[in-house]
Image (spheres, rainbow, N blue to C red):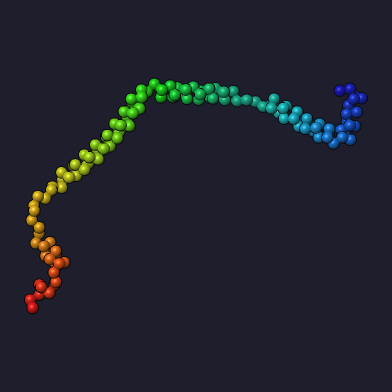
Amino acid sequence: MPDGMKIQVELHLENCEECAEYYQMAIIADKVMNEEKNEQSNPFLSTRIMADIEELEHQKAIVRSIPKYKKVLKPALISISVAAAIFLGVFMGNIYNPIQTSKSIPIEMAYMNDAALESVNMFSNE
């Protein structure tokens, strides 16, 4: 800027607060832009981002390549296996504990039931 014009601008900025504020904002914006120009970027950042994107696309392709019947078949087989394991465990547990086929009741049980229904005085010798 020529010297004469520069002096006129400085005088105006001393007298006009609105223009002085605008000028300060322009100076700050200029500093910010210069700092951003001097910022060094990481040369490997874009390479890592592109590698991650390619990995995600590869994983999506793998998921799309699995047939739908396999997506249903695997959970179904797991459920059936768990049910079979539970059934087999219960079955094996019952084989060890033989079923009592005796229909007779021990005599002690008969007395216990009678005692609950009848008076205790009946058993005394009086």
Quadrant location of the N terminus in the rendered image:
top right
Q: Residue furthest front?
A: 117
Taking depth in this image into account, of 42 and 13 the one nearest to the observer is 13
The spot of residue 29 in percent (x, y) is: 74, 30
Quadrant location of the C terminus in the rendered image:
bottom left
The spot of residue 3 in percent (x, y) is: 90, 24
Name the residue rendered at 41%, 22% in the picture: 64
The spot of residue 15 in percent (x, y) is: 89, 35
86 vs 62, left or right, is: left
Q: Residue furthest bottom?
A: 126
In the image, residue 37 sits, relative to residue 94, either above or below, namely above
Name the residue rendered at 9%, 50% in the picture: 101
26 vs 110, left or right, is: right
Taking depth in this image into account, of 32 and 41 the one nearest to the observer is 32
The spot of residue 66 in percent (x, y) is: 37, 23
Q: How many marks?
A: 0
55 vs 67, left or right, is: right
54 vs 118, left or right, is: right
Name the residue rendered at 83%, 32% in the picture: 19
- Location of residue 74 (image quadrant): top left
In the image, residue 45 sits, relative to residue 121, either above or below, namely above
Name the residue rendered at 13%, 72% in the picture: 120
- Location of residue 107 (image quadrant): bottom left
Taking depth in this image into account, of 81 and 1 the one nearest to the observer is 81
